[in-house]
Image: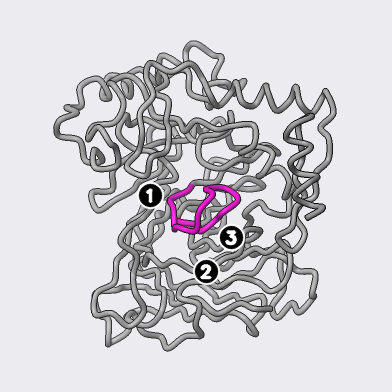
């Protein structure tokens, strides 16, 4: 009761920061400097919109001029020569026939935004405060700085992945076909199934995540995560984020239907992070047709190619016990009973496609809660190529 009273009083008399501890909230006052910083971030995200539209889930998006989305606030984008190179992309947006859109089903209006604009989700001060309350620990990361069977009770991130071996390789892309599941998480947790490319000290992730802090529900939703030059953010919510190039696609879409453990049919989505051979930009590809939906300029990264890739699950909890991953069960090495990532591939430093990827290793930081199986050319699944099974109940 005292916690509820504190929350209500702060909502009435001032701004708040919310700290989470075992799913409870503690309210603190924002300083004037902190409040001004929040307002600045809101202006960066909630740019003036031509119109407001809603997704089929009822979420509000502003249709923002292509060149005014948050990523164009990055210092590297102030060069007008670079803007000129963007205009062929904008031209393709204008020429795309909206009545033939591939992603019109995502929107209440059946189309999306007007040509020349892109949908940017509207966020509130409360949204930013909620996410900021978790701090850096809540942010996604790679598995390389963790150790096997790390039973430290303070460990908040857990991994069940297959990852490339060796720092001497160079990668210009990677893809996956990702089984869609809905692991159970608590409000202060997330469970993600993702492709991670390390680009020197920077990295990109894409896939789906169940993340109540980010999306305010327990549905699996698409995401990209950018870590670049010491800054990071989800989707296109900051100046280092992805530049969206479609007026009919939005990040954070709910992925439905999800697979049901034991069912004869499973559902999956295709994701790719591919470097453009001409200008070095990194592209996000999504869907069966590998549609290019957005990109990161090459200037975002201090290194031209990736040096490490991993596929699999990442789980985070602000407090014990840790959440589920995949279906939430230990593995049977079966596409019917386990979450999987199939047909993984990489594009090497010479732009050759490698669908075997014979130089991977398994990594699980704590086998009490999670498992991974990494195999190629399984007789039972001849069409799956290099396949990774992963998951577990967590509870550690």
| Magenta highlight range | 208-223
Residue occupying the point 74% across, 57% down:
24
Q: Of helix, strand and loop, which one carries label 1?
A: loop
Is residue 27 highlighted in magenta?
no
Looking at the image, residue 49 lies above or below residue 17 = above
Q: Is residue 77 left or right of residue 356?
A: right
Establish if 325 lies above or below 59: below
Rendered location of residue 37, percent (x, y): 73, 25
Would you say the residues marked 1 and 3 are in contact, meaning their CB atoms lie under 8 Å apart?
no
Residue placed under numbered mark 2 in the picture: 184
Quarter that holds the C terminus: bottom right
Cα separation between marks 1 and 3: 34 Å
Q: Residue furthest top?
A: 80
* Quadrant in which residue 323 is drawn: bottom right
Residue 199 location (% of width, % of height): 58, 48
Q: CA distance from mark 1 to mark 2?
A: 39 Å
Where residue 190 is drawn, which disc sits there?
Answer: 3
Q: Nearer the viewer, mark 1 or mark 2?
A: 2
Left or right: residue 316 compared with residue 324: right
**Residue 351 bears which disc, if any?**
1
Q: Does residue 214 belong to the magenta stretch?
A: yes
């Amino acid at each position: 009761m005292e916690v509820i009273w504190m929350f209500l009083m702060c909502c009435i008399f001032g701004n708040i920061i919310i700290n989470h501890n075992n799913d409870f909230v503690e309210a603190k006052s924002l300083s004037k400097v902190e409040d001004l910083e929040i307002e600045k971030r809101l202006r960066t995200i909630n740019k003036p919109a031509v119109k407001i539209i809603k997704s089929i889930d009822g979420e509000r998006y502003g249709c923002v001029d292509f060149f005014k989305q948050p990523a164009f606030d990055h210092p590297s984008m102030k060069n007008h020569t670079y803007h000129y190179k963007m205009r062929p992309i904008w031209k393709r947006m204008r020429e795309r026939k909206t009545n033939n859109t591939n992603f019109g089903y995502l929107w209440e209006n059946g189309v999306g935004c007007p040509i020349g604009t892109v949908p940017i989700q509207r966020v509130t001060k409360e949204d930013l405060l909620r996410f900021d309350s978790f701090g850096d620990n809540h942010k996604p990361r790679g598995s390389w700085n963790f150790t096997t069977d790390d039973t430290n009770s303070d460990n908040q991130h857990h991994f069940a992945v297959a990852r490339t071996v060796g720092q001497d390789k160079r990668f210009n892309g990677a893809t996956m076909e990702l089984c869609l599941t809905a692991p159970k998480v608590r409000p202060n947790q997330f469970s993600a199934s993702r492709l991670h490319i390390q680009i020197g000290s920077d990295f990109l992730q894409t896939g789906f995540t169940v993340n109540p802090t980010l999306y305010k529900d327990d549905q699996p939703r698409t995401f990209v995560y950018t870590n670049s030059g010491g800054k990071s953010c989800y989707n296109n919510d900051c100046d280092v984020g992805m530049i969206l190039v479609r007026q009919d696609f939005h990040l954070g879409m709910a992925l439905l239907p999800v697979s049901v453990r034991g069912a004869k049919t499973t559902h999956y989505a295709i994701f790719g992070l591919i470097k453009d051979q001409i200008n070095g930009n990194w592209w996000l590809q999504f869907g069966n047709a590998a549609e290019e939906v957005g990109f990161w300029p090459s200037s975002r990264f201090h290194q031209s190619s990736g040096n490490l890739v991993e596929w699999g699950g990442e789980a985070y909890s602000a407090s014990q016990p840790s959440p589920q991953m995949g279906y939430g069960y230990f593995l049977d090495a079966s596409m019917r009973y386990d979450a999987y990532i199939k047909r993984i591939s990489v594009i090497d430093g010479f732009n050759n496609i490698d669908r075997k990827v014979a130089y991977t290793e398994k990594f699980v930081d704590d086998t009490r809660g999670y498992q991974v199986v990494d195999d190629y050319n399984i007789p039972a699944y001849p069409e799956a190529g290099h396949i990774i099974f992963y998951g577990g109940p967590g509870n550690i």
